[in-house]
Image (cartoon, rainbow, N blue to C red):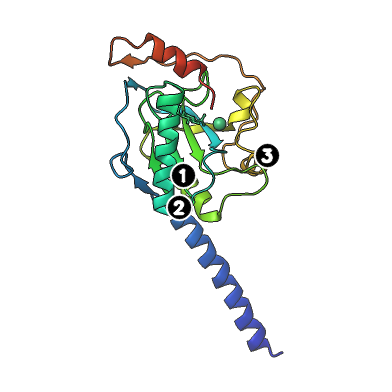
Amino acid sequence: MTFRQTFDILICCVMCVVLNIVVLVVSSSMDPVIVSRSDWHAKPPKSIEVMMNPVPYVVIHHSYLPPACFTTEECIKAMQWMQDLHQINNSWADIGYHFAVGGDGKAYEGRGWSRVGAHAPNYNSISIGICIIGDWRERLPPESQLTAVHQLIEMGVREGKIAEDYKLVGHKQVRDGTACPGEKLYSSIQSWPHFYKVPNPPLPRAQPAVITLKEDNRLKKRTALTGII
Ligand SMILES: *[C@@H]1O[C@H](CO)[C@@H](O)[C@H](O)[C@H]1NC(C)=O
Ligand SMILES: [Zn+2]
């Protein structure tokens, strides 16, 4: 091999690495495709509690059920299924999660950035709860689904909804008796940015002020704080 050939190969490798980094940086700084509540035909919430932003935590869940969805049509059905389960079977105000991310690579709006959730007791008003739709005990979600989760978190930070120094945890770290977000996904999120190894179970934390929009909220607030997903 001539010096010239070696040089060419070297330049090629360098360009390839640079290109990869550019793609990575650009894709993670892009906003995910957000599917609004009206786009997935959500039922209205029974009541609303406003949450203060930015929140210091991100809590990662899997749905377990419904199973993974890979088309937007399937993911819309999954969202409706979860909303019915939470509103009807569990008698909660709304779907418990702030967002859910589908195998179609889209982020579905649940309670959104600024409403108290029902996904992890003690953390419902100080975190964004993200459900990665599927059962991730034995396998990992597709890369595109995980990219959308990262993009969603980055978007939240950029828009001042999530604190810049946020702590990311898996559901099981903040609640006894759940395997959520599944063993395989849980081992993966430990290498994500901002992963936080909290003691299990956590100490209850001070809650930020919550503005209650509706009066008869005591029952809902209690179920929101004790709800299991
Ligand atoms: C929710 O309630 C419906 C109707 O009562 C029932 O058919 C269904 O099995 C319940 N879903 C779950 C997951 O428990
Ligand atoms: Zn969970």
Q: Position of residue 165 (x, y in %)?
A: 50, 32
- Front residue of 123/8: it is 123
Residue 70 drawn above or below residue 155: below
Name the residue: 31% across, 14% down.
Answer: 212
CA gap, disc 1 to disc 3? 18 Å
- Badge 3: residue crowd in 10 Å (few <14, some 14–19, many ≥20): some
Upstream in the sequence, badge 2 or badge 3? Answer: 2
Q: Is mark 3 within 8 Å of ligand 2?
A: no
SS for dot 3: helix
Q: Are marks 2 and 3 in contact (CB under 8 Å)?
A: no
Residue beneath disc 1: 101
The residue at 49%/49% (across/down) is 69
Element marked by disc 1: strand
Give the residue type at disc 2. Gly
Residue position marked by numbered label 2 in the rendering = 105
Q: Position of residue 149 (x, y in %)?
A: 48, 45
Residue type, numbered disc 1: Val
Mark 2: few/some/many CA within 10 Å (<14, 14-19, 20+) = many
Quarter of the picture holding the N terminus: bottom right
The crowd level at tag 1 (other Cα within 10 Å; few <14, some 14-19, many 20+) is many
Decide: marks 1, 2 in contact (CB < 8 A)?
A: yes
- The quarter of the picture where residue 214 lies is top left
Residue 133 showing in the rendered view: yes
Q: N-terminal of the two: label 1 or label 3?
A: 1
Q: Disc 2 versus disc 3: distance between alpha carbons? A: 21 Å
Q: CA distance from mark 1 to mark 2?
A: 7 Å
Tag 3 residue:
183
Residue at 45% from the left image edge and 12% from the top image edge: 222
